[in-house]
Image (cartoon, rainbow, N blue to C red):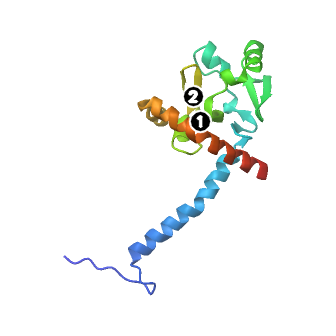
Amino acid sequence: MTVRSRTHSTGYSATALTRWILLLAVLLMVPAVWSAAAGQHEGAVYTEDGVAIKGYDPVAYFTLGEPTQGSAQYSVEWDGAEWWFAGTEHRDMFADDPERYAPRYGGYCAYAAAQGSVSDIDPDQWAIEDGRLYLNRNARFHRRFHADLAANIAAADQNWPALRAKLEEAAAAQ
C-alpha cells in the first residue's frame, strides 16, 4: 500500500504544514498562559481577587492538620496579598512569623515550580515537609511531587527565584 501526501506550493506536505501551524499556535499561546497566571497575583503570591491561597488559612494546616477556609474578618496584608484566617489566634501567629506559615513558592503549585512554571492550586492538595507548607494543583501533581520529593523540592527551590522575578515583572507591567 502506498501512502501519498499532497505537497503545497511551499514544498511542505499537508501533514508537515499542519504540524508547523500547530507548533506556531502553541508558541504564540505561551505569553498568554504567562499572562493568565500573572493575572492571578499581586507580587509573587498566588491570589484570586487579591486573596492568597483561595482564602484558606495557612496556619490551620499546621495547627489543625487540615485545610480550613479563612474569613476576611481575620485578615493580614503580607507580600502583596491579603491572607485570611479562621480566627484571631491564627491571624496573630501568621503576623508574628509569616515566613513560617506561608506556603512555599508564593502559594503556587509546588510541582509546577519544580517543572519551571507556575500554576494555580487546590488547597486540599497539600503537605508539610520539614516544617514547610507545599500546595499542588491537583491530586495527580500532588502524587508526582511526592514521588521524588527531595528532587522536586530541590528543583522548585532552584526555579523559584527566576519564576518569582517573572511574576513580579508581570505585576509591575500591569
Q: Position of residue 21 (x, y in %)?
A: 50, 70
Type of the residue with mark 2: Tyr
Q: Position of residue 93 (x, y in %)?
A: 73, 15
The answer to which of marks 1 and 2 sits earlier in the sequence is 1
Residue placed under numbered mark 2 in the picture: 134
What's the mark number on residue 77?
Answer: none
Q: Position of residue 105 (x, y in %)?
A: 62, 35
Mark 1 → mark 2, Cα distance in angstroms: 10 Å
Q: How many marks?
A: 2
Q: Is residue 19 left or right of residue 173?
A: left
Mark 2 burial class by Cα count in 10 Å: few <14, some 14-19, many 20+: many
Q: Is residue 94 above or below residue 161?
A: above
What's the mark number on residue 121?
Answer: 1
**Rendered residue at 46%/29% (across/down):** 149
Type of the residue with mark 1: Ile
Q: Is residue 37 left or right of residue 111?
A: right
Say if residue 86 shows up in the picture: yes
On-image quarter of the N terminus: bottom left
